[in-house]
Image (spheres, helix red, strand yellow):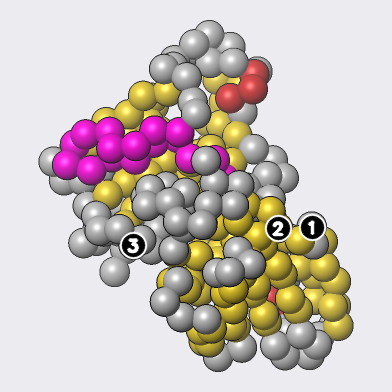
């Protein structure tokens, strides 16, 4: 099955700086890679996703890059704000399966 | 446009009891997946329902069962509750095609005493 590893587990940045979270996956057949943001007491919120036919996708201050050869993908948040503080999860489906295998999460803290 | 809604938000049970959790998918979605999230961990896939049938199942025992209704809403049932079943139970809905984004509800926090 799919194995998704996520680093770092915690990340603190100053407001306005950039944050980068990295994930690796094991199943070379995986072709869809979502990122979720989970705030305290809430469910995971889909913030951006990427499919294997593109290498990068941007949505305002958030971007995701994908390297299929190396089997890793990364989340980039620029100009961080205190409201970006949350736990972020990467995920990937094993092969063509419809379920998601999640990473272990990154607690991002943006310091004012 | 209502998102995914789950009920109840919190539940306390004792060992050996049975529990039913409910989920209404986002409008227009026909597929429902259930996940278990232990404290400090990522969600783990339990199973997925489409056209009222279990389409895929994760590594969970038969004590975990589910149902999907004609209106696409879903229930998760857990029998013979164990202390280790304490977790946040998340429902996600999506369209039925491959690689469709899954949208999550805020979950049901289940505590087993």
Asked if disc 2 and disc 1 are in contact, CB closer than 8 Å, the reply is: yes
- Which residue is identified by label 2? A6
Kindly state the secondary structure of the residue where label 3 is placed: loop
Q: Which residue is mark 1?
A: A9
Is residue B108 in view from this perspective? Answer: no
Rendered view: A20 above or below A28: below
The quarter of the displayed image where residue A72 is located: bottom right
- Side (left or right) of A19 relative to B67: right
Q: Is residue B82 visible?
A: yes
Q: Which mark is residue B100?
A: 3
Please tell me whether residue B19 is drawn above or below residue A32 in the rendered image: above
Q: Chain of mark 2?
A: A
Compared with A69, A54 (above or below) is below
Instruction: Please indicate whether residue A3 sits to the left or right of residue B31 in the image.
Output: right
Q: Which residues are magenta?
A: B43-58
Characterize the local packing of mark 3: few (<14), some (14-19) or many (20 or more) Cα atoms within 10 angstroms: few
The percent position of residue A49, horizontal first and vertical second, equals 48, 71
Spatial CA span between label 3 and label 2: 22 Å
- Distance (Cα) linking label 1 and label 3: 27 Å
Residue at the front extreme of this rendering = A69
Q: Residue A32 in the image: state x and y as whole percent.
A: 44, 64
Question: Could you tell me which chain the residue with mark 3 belongs to?
Answer: B
**Residue at x 58% of width, y 25% of height:** B85
Query: Which quadrant of the rendered structure holds the N terminus of chain B?
Result: bottom left
Magenta stretch, main secondary structure class: strand
């Amino acid at each position: 099955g799919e194995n998704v590893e996520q680093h770092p587990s915690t990340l603190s940045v100053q407001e306005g700086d950039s944050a980068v979270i990295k994930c690796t996956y094991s199943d070379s057949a995986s072709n869809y890679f979502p990122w979720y943001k989970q705030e305290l007491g809430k469910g995971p919120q889909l913030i951006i996703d990427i499919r294997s036919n593109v290498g990068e996708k941007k949505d305002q201050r958030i971007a995701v890059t994908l390297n299929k050869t190396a089997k890793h993908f990364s989340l980039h948040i620029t100009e961080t704000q205190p409201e970006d503080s949350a736990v972020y999860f990467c995920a990937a489906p094993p092969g063509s399966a419809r379920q998601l295998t999640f990473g272990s999460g990154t607690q991002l803290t943006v310091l004012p | 446009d209502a998102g995914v809604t789950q009920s109840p938000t919190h539940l306390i049970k004792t060992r050996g009891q049975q529990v039913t959790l409910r989920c209404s998918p986002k409008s227009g979605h026909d597929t429902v997946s259930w996940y278990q999230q232990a404290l400090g961990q990522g969600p783990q896939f339990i199973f997925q329902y489409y056209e009222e049938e279990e389409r895929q199942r994760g590594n969970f025992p038969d004590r975990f069962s589910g149902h999907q209704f004609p209106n696409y809403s879903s229930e998760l049932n857990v029998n013979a509750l164990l202390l280790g079943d304490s977790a946040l139970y998340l429902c996600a809905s999506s369209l039925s095609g491959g690689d469709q984004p899954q949208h999550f509800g805020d979950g049901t926090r289940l505590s087993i005493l």
